[in-house]
Amino acid sequence: MTIDDIRSRIRTALPDAEVSVTDTTGGGDHFDATVVSSAFVGKGPVERHRMVYAALNDAIIGPSAPIHALALTTATPEEYQRK
Amino acid sequence: MTEDLRKRIADTIARGHVMLFMKGNPAMPQCGFSAAVVSILKQAGVAFESYNILADPELREGLKEYSSWPTFPQLYVDSKLVGGADIVRDLHEKGQLAQILGPNA
């Protein structure tokens, strides 16, 4: 799994998303992602995470799934600007 | 998922007012994310129950489907999913966790 794979899958599910991904160990299996999308407006944190997880589901679930850990930060464009 | 497994999952989630599904146990977490949530709950001074999903592969896989949440740890309050490590950390930093965990937690 590469950073580009993750980014493109999230953007397929959330087309307006700004996605930044880092490979935290360099091993291609632990990632840190920040996703900024207007699709998160009015949604709580659990629902937002579920939307991102859904885009990556088969890469996270299962004994041979390539993603072992994914630290996720979500924000709407407005929330992101306030940071 | 079988009805038996679904019921077993629901019953397990309901074991504690604050219920943490984690890798390992609070004394010896087997994953950095699980350790982080245990540490935050201890800082918050709340009593919580935990379940070691590493010891129960059937429940581990079933819970991912049950909750539409593919990773662990998973923290529940009154059987409602609060989130995983990122969300718990975020709520803690914003000072909102205590309110979610409830006054008698």
Image (cartoon, rainbow, N blue to C red):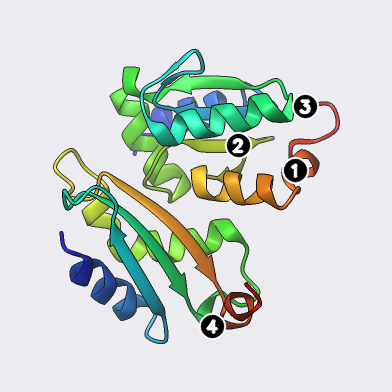
Residue A26's place in the image compared with B97, above or below, is below
Of the numbered discs 1 and 3, the one sitting upstream in the chain is 1
In space, the residues marked 3 and 2 are separated at their CA atoms by 12 Å
Mark nearer the viewer, 1 or 2: 1
Q: Quadrant of the C terminus of chain A?
A: bottom right
Task: Rate crowding at label 4 as few (under 14), some (14 to 19) or many (20 or more) other CA atoms within 10 Å.
Answer: some
The percent coordinates of residue A27 (x first, y second) are: 16, 48
Residue beneath label 3, please? B105
Amino acid under label 4? Answer: Ser
Residue reaching furthest top? B27
Mark nearer the viewer, 4 or 2: 4
The percent coordinates of residue B29 (x first, y second) are: 42, 21
Q: Quadrant of the N terminus of chain A?
A: bottom left
In space, the residues marked 4 and 2 are separated at their CA atoms by 27 Å
The percent coordinates of residue B88 (x first, y second) are: 59, 44
Label 2 element class: strand
Amino acid under label 2? Answer: Tyr
In space, the residues marked 4 and 1 are separated at their CA atoms by 26 Å
Which chain is mark 2 on? B
Q: Which mark is residue A38?
A: 4
